[in-house]
Image: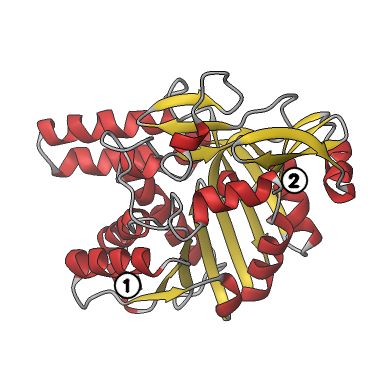
Amino acid sequence: MKFSEYMSEWLYGDDGYYSDYKTIGKEGDFYTAVSTSQFFGGTIAKHIISLVDEGFLSENAAICEIGAHHGYFLADVVQFIYTLRPILLESFEFVIIERFDALQEQQRNYFYESFGDVVTLKHYKSLRELQCQNAFFIANEIFDAFPCELYFKGKIARVNGHDVEFDVEDSWVDAKAKKYHKDRGEIALGYEEFAKEMSNAAQKFEFMSFDYGEMIARPDFSLRVYDKHEVIPFFDEKIKREVLFKNADITYDVTFAHVKDAYEDSGVEFIELKAQMVALIDMGLLDLLEILKKNVSEKIYTQELEKAKMLIMPNFLGERFKMIRFRKS
């Protein structure tokens, strides 16, 4: 099979890594910004409110997370909207795009435990099912989870068992590799279709996503496995792929130029690419921490401050992770 089929089965097969709930954070395989601090979602909530104030988002817009895992991120957004502008909870529509029934159930339960009947959560299996006038789409670490082909000097990888051989020709992948000046590395599949689905889902929207990578493609393979916070390069001679298959996360660095081109080809405007630390500060993270300081004890403030620092520290999540933003007006 092609590597993209192997990766898709690893992550999204019937018993794939993402087919059921996985713990994220200290007890899991990796950290995310969501698992680090509630102020990640809080900063997005502040930005959403600013979009309402500037007239880009209507008060009955859909606030939609794509690939929400447990639902913590969107729930944090909801909690901070309640704190900063509670009247919007009466008019916003909160939506999660989630393909797996088991994860939908986890998300519903978490929202009910958190908000009772105050907040209604809607689910769709894909963006194709959603049709709305106005929306804010948010995703965290989604583009690195798209299946990819492995490319090396004109050939793509074929997987036999768990062994990889570069002996297949693919003109589409070859053209993408040449476009992004890669003679080896990962070529993501599905960005174009995903961008078109989002463009068709809402007449007017902003989309913001956080992921690791760079605008320009890196010159080598970045494919790696996360297993209990150990980072294992996919081509490490000591890797036991048959053991890790479906039991650990597999990922790669995003080439944001590819994401940008996919959205622009779908008629969506690219706004900006920023380091996560810059994006969160620009959207008001420090303002939220100042509000917290005035309303809680010094002990609680210090605890939350230390968590929030991890979002913007260059040596943790702040520099390596990027925020990319698009708009369709």
Mark 2 residue crowding within 10 angstroms, few (<14) / some (14–19) / many (20+):
some
Compared across the picture, whether 71 is left or right of 318 comes to left
198 or 281: nearer the viewer: 198
Residue 29 shown left or right of residue 58 in the figure:
left
* Residue 73, position as x, y percentages in the image: 36, 54
First in residue order: circle 2 vs circle 1: 1
In the rendered structure, which amino acid carries the disc numbered 1?
Answer: Leu
User: Could you tell me residue 292's position as x and y percent?
Assistant: 22, 42
The residue sitting at 50% across, 74% down in the picture is: 58
Q: Is residue 14 above or below residue 165?
A: below
Image point (67%, 41%), residue name? 159
Q: Amino acid at mark 2?
A: His
Q: Which residue is mark 1?
A: 89
Question: Which residue is located at x 43 percent, y 56 percent?
Answer: 15
The residue pinned by badge 2 equals 258
Could you say whether the residue bearing mark 2 is in a helix, strand or loop? helix
Residue nearest the observer in this picture, 126 or 50: 126
